[in-house]
């Protein structure tokens, strides 16, 4: 394959990298004065990348770039589209947050674009070296974003914790990759699968376990979830919304491609690990959230809980299971971004964030529209019909049942009832408690626009997207099983 074709297949990564470098130079020359303009340019670039990604012809046959390092297929297209959408939403809601604190700089948008480039490489990589390059590009950007509010002690603490634990996870992944390479003799996904099919030794199994353990950290799955509540609470809220959406999509997609690709011939070696992580994440996420009073920490445990449901689809190890994972990810992105944007809008007249249940007491009286939006989002996260979040849980449980994993589905359904408790707590506090403060300050139009879109998607109207979403997710899943 020639370089022209390879550059065409990776045009979004190449184009976004070039634009990010240009914006970085502009930021260095102009300082904070052009921060809003740089953010608009970054949003426009990501929109362009999104349009180009969905417009790439997809014949169903994967196309490799740069000698088999990067693969352009339906799975990568689906995941990258979600990543770009989530990144755009988090950029749109960021300016007002940072401007009120006097810390809005153009570097924020540049870091987000570089992060999107790294995530795009992660979900398209079919070689361990390409995977690690994308993973580190995304991770290094994330460490800086977590501590972006330099005057906030909690933000600095969040960035340091994320950096230390993220470095540990990267080391675990790299060690696992070295074992996989040592026992397969190649870094190519297809080569690893062929080698492991012919001979899967104990050393190779240890390599698989180490790789999966490192990836479990990236998706905040139990028992590698310890960083999530502290980082989510300490990081600036727009950054927290980003961490809970785009990088989560990228990490899950990377895990799915690894499990079904190079490790796809040895399902029994990783399936039990995924089942344990799924059930543990559901239970720990639900129980951990019950005692939380801080809203961001509660949503952090909620994200751990939702990762468990996503992993149930992967545990099925079938095309239907992967399709369920992609459907769940699509719905999860809108539920999560909507929830964190609603938290962004919870501010008093002085700009101070309302961060606890006491702060939102009686919100239905002081800000009824915002309260009803939060109600829809919380019920959707709980999987209560007829909201669209119910469909996400339904498809992953259906995939588990079809794979004869009825016990896993039954335990997951039973454990999901626990999670409903803390989501309903939102409703109780907002609608049945007396107001303890003034109404939240007026939110900008950009926040209402993003929140409105997210609520619209998770509402019963979201089922209108069902046929399109199902076919797109099926095509994404079939791309992974094309050569299997």
Image (tube, rainbow, N blue to C red):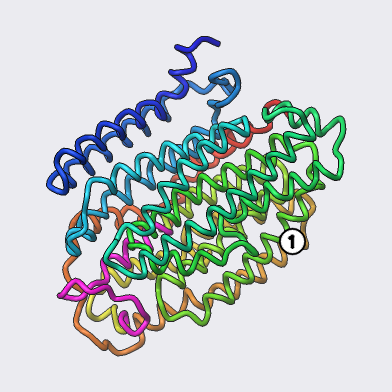
Instruction: Tell me: 138 left or right of 369.
Output: right
Q: Position of residue 384 (x, y in %)?
A: 52, 66
Relative to residue 422, is residue 24 depicted above or below? above
Chief secondary structure of the magenta portion: loop
Q: Residue at x 63, y 63 (%)?
A: 222
Q: Residue at x 26, y 50 (%)?
A: 92
Q: Position of residue 400 (x, y in %)?
A: 71, 53
Quadrant location of the C terminus in the rendered image: top right
- Mark 1 residue crowding within 10 angstroms, few (<14) / some (14–19) / many (20+): many
347 in magenta: yes
Q: Position of residue 199 (x, y in %)?
A: 87, 33
Q: Position of residue 361 (x, y in %)?
A: 32, 84
| Magenta-highlighted residues | 336-360
Seen from the viewer's position, the closer of residues 118 and 359 is 118
Q: Secondary structure at mark 1?
A: helix
Residue where numbered disc 1 is placed:
408
84 in magenta: no
Quadrant location of the N terminus in the rendered image: top right
Relative to residue 389, is residue 74 depicted above or below? above
């Amino acid at each position: 394959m020639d370089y022209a074709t390879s550059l065409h297949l990776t045009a979004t990564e190449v184009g976004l990298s070039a634009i990010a470098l240009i914006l970085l130079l502009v930021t260095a020359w102009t300082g904070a004065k052009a921060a809003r303009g740089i953010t608009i340019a970054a949003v426009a670039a990501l929109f362009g990348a999104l349009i180009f990604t969905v417009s790439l012809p997809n014949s169903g046959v994967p196309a490799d770039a740069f000698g088999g390092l990067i693969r352009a297929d339906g799975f990568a297209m689906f995941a990258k589209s979600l990543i770009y959408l989530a990144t755009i939403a988090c950029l749109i809601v960021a300016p007002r947050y940072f401007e009120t604190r006097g810390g809005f700089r153009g570097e924020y948008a540049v870091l987000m674009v570089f992060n999107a480039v790294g995530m795009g490489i992660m979900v398209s990589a079919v070689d361990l070296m390409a995977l690690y390059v994308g993973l580190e590009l995304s991770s290094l950007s994330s460490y800086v974003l977590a501590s972006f509010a330099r005057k906030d002690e909690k933000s600095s603490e969040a960035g340091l914790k994320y950096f230390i634990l993220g470095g540990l996870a990267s080391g675990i992944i790299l060690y696992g990759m070295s074992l996989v390479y040592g026992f397969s003799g190649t870094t190519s996904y297809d080569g690893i699968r062929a080698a492991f099919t012919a001979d899967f030794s104990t050393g190779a199994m240890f390599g698989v376990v180490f790789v999966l353990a490192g990836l479990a950290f990236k998706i905040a799955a139990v028992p590698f979830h310890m960083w999530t509540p502290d980082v989510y609470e300490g990081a600036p809220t727009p950054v927290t919304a980003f961490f809970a959406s785009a990088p989560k999509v990228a990490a899950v997609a990377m895990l799915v491609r690894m499990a079904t690709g190079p490790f796809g011939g040895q399902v029994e070696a990783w399936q039990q690990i995924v089942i344990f992580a799924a059930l543990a994440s559901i239970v720990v996420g639900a129980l951990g959230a019950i005692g939380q009073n801080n809203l961001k920490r509660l949503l952090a445990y909620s994200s751990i809980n939702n990762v468990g449901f996503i992993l149930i689809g992967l545990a099925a190890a079938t095309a239907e299971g992967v399709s369920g994972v992609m459907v769940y990810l699509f719905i999860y992105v809108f539920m999560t971004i909507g929830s964190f944007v609603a938290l962004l809008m919870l501010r008093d007249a002085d700009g101070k964030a309302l961060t606890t249940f006491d702060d939102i007491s009686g919100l239905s009286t002081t800000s009824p529209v915002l309260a009803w939006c939060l109600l829809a989002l919380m019920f959707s996260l709980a999987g209560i019909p007829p909201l669209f979040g119910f469909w996400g849980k339904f498809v992953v449980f259906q995939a588990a049942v079809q794979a004869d994993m009825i016990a896993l589905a039954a335990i997951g359904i039973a454990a999901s009832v626990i999670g409903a408790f803390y989501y309903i707590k939102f409703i109780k506090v907002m609608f049945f408690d007396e107001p303890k403060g003034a109404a939240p300050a007026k939110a900008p139009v950009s926040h209402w626009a993003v929140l409105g879109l997210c609520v619209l998607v998770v509402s019963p109207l979201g089922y209108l997207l069902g046929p399109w979403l199902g076919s797109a997710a099926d095509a994404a899943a079939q791309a992974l099983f094309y050569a299997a």
